[in-house]
Image (cartoon, rainbow, N blue to C red):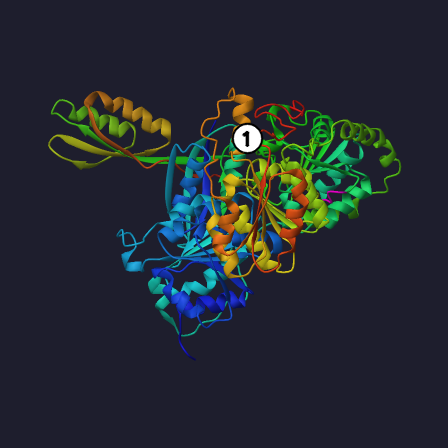
Amino acid sequence: MTKKNGAEIFIECLLKEGVDTVFGFPGGAVLPIYDALYDSPLRHILVRHEQGAVHMADGYARASGKPGVVVVTSGPGATNTVTGIATAYMDSIPLVVFTGQVPTPLIGNDAFQEADIVGITRPCTKHNYLVKDIRDLPRIIKESFYIATTGRPGPVLVDIPKDVLTAALPDFKYPEKVHIESYQPNYKGHPGQIRKALDLILSSKRPVVYAGGGVVLSNASSELKAFSEKLGLPTTTTLMGLGAFPGTHPLFMGMLGMHGTYAANMAVMNTDCLVAVGARFDDRVTGKIDEFAPYAGIVHIDIDPTSISKNVKVDIPIVGDVRIVLKDLIKACPPIKGFKKGIQPWRDEIAGWSGTHRLSYKQDPKGKIKPQFVIDRLYELTGGDAIITTEVGQNQMWAAQFFKYDKARTFLTSGGLGTMGFGFPAAIGAQIAFPEKTVVDIAGDGSLQMNIQELATAVQYKLPVKVVILNNMVLGMVRQWQELFFQKRYSHTCISVAPDFVKLAEAYGAVGLRATRPGEVDRVLEKGLSVKDRPVLMDFRVDQFECVYPMVPAGQPLNKMLLV
Amino acid sequence: MRHTISVLVTNEFGVLSRISGLFSGRGFNIESLSVAETFDPKISRMTIVTSGDDKVLEQINKQLNKLVNVIKVYDFTGEEHIERELALIKVNLTAETRAEILSIVDIFRAKVVDVSSRTYTIEITGDEEKIRAITELLRPFGIKELVRTGRVAMARSPKQR
């Protein structure tokens, strides 16, 4: 048998794991890996900044459901991944990040490009490893993919010293199976709890389903739809859950929370039975926690026991995989004579809320472009058939409110960490996973500039990612808070000194387009959407003073919404 | 309320920092922590004394269980169990106080494990109350140094935890 070195084994393990694409950036400590990559079938996407690599892998994972894989060097290469890893951790995205490390005899000696990345990422990874011995490498790679993708998914980091990459292993075998005694996720919900949950739901008069990102992660959207439809349950989703339930469905009330719809927030405040499915009662969802869903008995389905009764006291917890539990719920559901009729008055009440307080904006055809109008038009012109990524702030909330997501994995956003600069590299990752689909990053001018260097990556790989810049020349969401809560003292939120995005796109070899009046919006979108061989930046000069409404001020209960 | 928690973990480097990092990162208290290998050298046991209300303890328990290296978490609260701690106390010594100190040592069934012309080093094992009591009694003589191991605990029931 020929001896393989650590780097060759590394590549072979990834291939055995079914990895087709890695996102990375070379450096001294990972040179052996890059040498082995040189004649391997593995596709490597060369990024321009390691943070971009992690967001790309993240976007790839969110869009495809497969784990995203990153390779970077030691020291700064590793530390640059931290924001991306924390982003994935907060949203439970399966990633495996491989970092180079200085050779084992130098660890701890403040060697050149040394950083204790295992120590640094301990609180923002699901698990991490330092490989100290070549013999452990195959097992650790196997375990890292297993841990990243099972249970509640999350990022796993594997730190590999350079001498491990160059060491030889005579009898390399990739393990077939994983057994980690201390890690045994529970997938099946307890039948007793499922019965109790059904009793509570069926005895309710004002039920609401509140679905989160867990539905997307467990690929349970068809089960969720079947469940809500079977009982006629009004359904809302979190930001992370958008697309998990069809956005155009008659039972859908829109998103809930700080910038949720009037109907969804009122429904949650008045429900007598809240069924939380793969959601975690984040503070942006609950508003003032003591007054959240005050009349509700709460059922909570989640694979992670720590999510249960962390923020809100839950009456009926069901620990398990959302998809399996929903299936069991549907199966265990007795005939429901009269139930739907019984909740009809409740549905009428919700329809009333929806009717009186729609999400809205006013576009004066002669005035400035309203950002919501751009998203509205994007929805119309794509027919809703696109993968949308967002940056963070107003652009993100408008993208959540005004584009309708009928399918899971078509709305990719940094929900938990709220990472500006996420959307563009995530769009690149999604485009790599789905080369034929329309992928659009709905961006703000502030966020986009946090990872604008990845334009070069998108140009290099001829990726037709579209960037819709809602350019208001301010850090819009912060500006909005200053307007509403800080007496309009606009401290350091004006970023009008900015590049000319059209020229910038051209400088990178991308396409740049601009619209300054409402009448130009369609033309720019149509032209932008038609480009197939390179990225497009579309610079929409929008109204600076537009705010995101409804808005529940931080610390207020959900029914204390500021409306337009 | 104070709780004594026993945590079985895989015996690997970095596990202690995962546990202590979890406590600091989530704002949980650690009053004492003791770690050592178990009968099985692949497994270590940590005994952690912490405090918090029921909600906090529930989270501590679940968050610990979520760590990949944690095999089992056991909260002794409300269970019959034995708790012990060991302390080494170095106390000042004069010709006049020698006898009195020795009688305290005797009463507490402690041991003098090191002696110099000016100090005794006393080893005492017991629960927290006992260690506090002897410390108070020795304090007037002048305690030069005090080292405590932190609590270890074991359930009384014959069942193996």
Q: Is residue A246 magenta?
A: yes
**What's the residue at 63%, 36% (across, down)?**
A369
Quadrant for the N terminus of chain A in the image: bottom left
**What's the residue at 31%, 54% (across, down)?**
A113
Q: Position of residue A346 (x, y in %)?
A: 81, 29
Toward the viewer: A8 or A387? A387
Residue range in magenta is A243-248
Label 1 residue SS? helix
Residue A238 in view in this figure: no
A429 left or right, relative to B93 = right
Q: Position of residue A132 (x, y in %)?
A: 36, 60
Toward the viewer: A109 or A236? A236
Chief SS of the magenta region: loop
Residue that mark 1 sits on: B55
Residue B35 in view in this figure: yes
Q: Position of residue A502 (x, y in %)?
A: 53, 48
Q: Is residue A54 above or below residue A362?
A: below
Toward the viewer: A87 or A396? A396
